[in-house]
Amino acid sequence: MNYSLFDDASDMQPWIEPICEGALILRHFSVSDEIALLDGIQQILSKHPFRQMRTPNGHRMSVAMTCCGEVGWVSDSNGYRYSAYDPENGEHWPAMPDSFYLLAVQAAQEAGFPDFKPDSCLINQYQARSHLSLHQDKDEKNLGAPIVSFSLGIPATFLFGGMQRTDAIQRYHLAHGDVVVWGGPARLRYHGVAPIKEAAHPLLGTQRINLTFREAI
Ligand code: MD6
Ligand code: FE
């Protein structure tokens, strides 16, 4: 039984969950800006729809991606890299919406990274059973800058390992509105996303969307 008038609201109060030195989760951080984020995503998708890229060894990724900002992350038979152009249509990636930039800077600030100036945002779409294998984010030019990662829609289990692929892995439940900030001594830790379980979210339906902001160039 729920006796408090305020339980629903207080459940959504932001709070900080430390992961390790350099990494933490800002719980519920972006819930109040969900509409601005979804509007921005829709705008980007209208000209640069989600697509499943191929890894250098020819596998199609289960996660679908698009980008905004000065450069976007692309993968094909030539490898992973940042590019100013969408390989699907040759057009420049769309500018990062101001609302995205401001929210990412704010999140970084709250996590103790006051100088963050993201120039790239990778937008990932997960459906049920999509996953992201363990990897390091090391293609960015400024590894002194953190990565700021927004989760929207259905939940995920974030896998957080160590500096070696074979190190022990911690698991974190990421819900709509949660933001992971990741830098300093944690910047090159292996991480991934476990296969997504079927679920539905009132605003996003059966998908999870993840935005990751970086200083890539
Ligand atoms: C995701 N995120 O959460 C994938 N990388 O869908 C990442 O790969 C990631 O969340 C570096 C730092 C934070 C992240
Ligand atoms: Fe990553």
Image (spheres, rainbow, N blue to C red):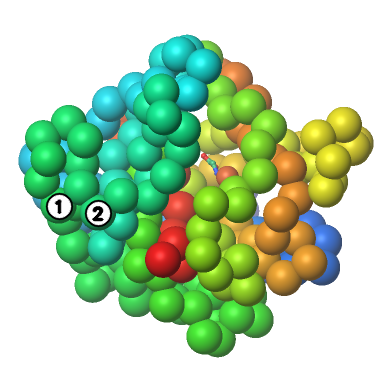
Ligand 2 location (quadrant): top right
The residue nearer to you, when weighing 151 against 98, is: 98
- Identify the residue at horizontal 36%, vertical 60% (top origin): 120
> Is the residue indicated by label 1 positioned so its CB lies within 8 Å of ligand 2?
no
Check residue 25 in the rendering and tell me which mark sits there, or answer none. Answer: none
Per the model, the C-alpha gap separating discs 1 and 2 is 6 Å
Residues tagged 1 and 2 counted as in contact (Cβ below 8 A): yes
In the rendered view, does 89 fall on the left or right side of 10? left
In the rendered view, does 185 fall on the left or right side of 193? right
Q: Which residue is mark 1?
A: 92
In the rendered view, does 19 fall on the left or right side of 127? right
- Of mark 1 and mark 2, the one earlier in the sequence is 2
- Identify the residue at horizontal 57%, vertical 28% (top origin): 132
User: In the image, residue 75 lies at what x, y percent?
Assistant: 40, 33
Asked where in the image residue 26 lies, by quadrant, the reply is: bottom right
Q: In what element is the residue under mark 1?
A: loop
Amino acid type indicated by mark 1: His
User: In the image, residue 7 lies at what x, y percent?
Assistant: 57, 58
Q: Work out whether 110 lies above or below 69.
A: below
Can residue 33 be seen by looking at this rendering? no
Q: Which residue is mark 2?
A: 84
Can residue 159 be seen by looking at this rendering? yes
